Image (cartoon, rainbow, N blue to C red):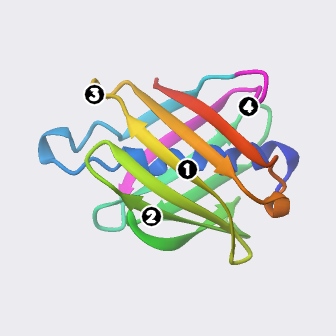
Amino acid sequence: MFTVRMKSVVCGVALVGALAVATSVRAQIEVGTWVRQAEAAMPGVMTMTVERCCGNGRRILYRMEGTPSVMTFESRFDGSDAPMLVDGKPTGSTMAVKRLDDHRTFTVIKVNGKAIGTSKAALSADGKTITVENEITSADGGQKVGKSTEVWVRK
């Protein structure tokens, strides 16, 4: 099960899909480091490093300030379940990220095979921010049930 700090990563990890830009002109826009804008509901500094992997997919590394743990996720962005790892070990959670177009994705988050929520992510036209709308429908993953919005900014 997740540590308290790593639980907040579950929602943020859904933005991964917004980073899969389809056109070759914009193919590099997502690669790099992003910082989640802190707010009362999700305090603390979280960074996300995006790397190319798995064909047209991405490897994402999440780090929460003050925690040595690293959450990783590799996805092909084709809607198939992909495991989330913390420090290289399975968490029991998966994400199924589906690319909708070159700026938007839809993600289903699962814990132990049970869907606990969804996320819609959108990359801004200028490629500088990602807005993620999360809806957690089950507390099985340790998340608070309800809707939340996150904004990530390119570092």
Q: Which mark is residue 52?
A: none
Q: Name the amino acid type tagged 3.
A: Ala
User: Residue 14, percent across and down?
Assistant: 55, 50
Q: Which region is colored magenta?
A: 39-52
Lower position in the chain sequence, tag 1 or tag 4: 4
Residue type highlighted by circle 4: Glu
Q: Residue 1 in magenta? A: no
Give the quadrant of the N terminus.
bottom right
Q: Which residue is mark 1?
A: 119
**Residue denoted by label 2:** 75
Q: Is residue 23 left or right of residue 10?
A: left
* Residue 150 in which image quadrant: top right
Of circles 2 and 1, which is in front?
1
Q: CA distance from mark 4 to mark 3?
A: 29 Å
Label 1 environment density (alpha carbons within 10 Å; few <14, some 14–19, many ≥20):
many
Residue 48 position, x and y percent, is 54, 39
Q: Residue at x 27, y 47 (%)?
A: 21
Question: Could one spot residue 1 in this view of the protein?
Answer: no
List the residue tagged with mark 4.
Answer: 65
| Residue closer to the observer: 146 or 31 | 146
| Alpha carbon separation for disc pair 4 and 2 | 24 Å
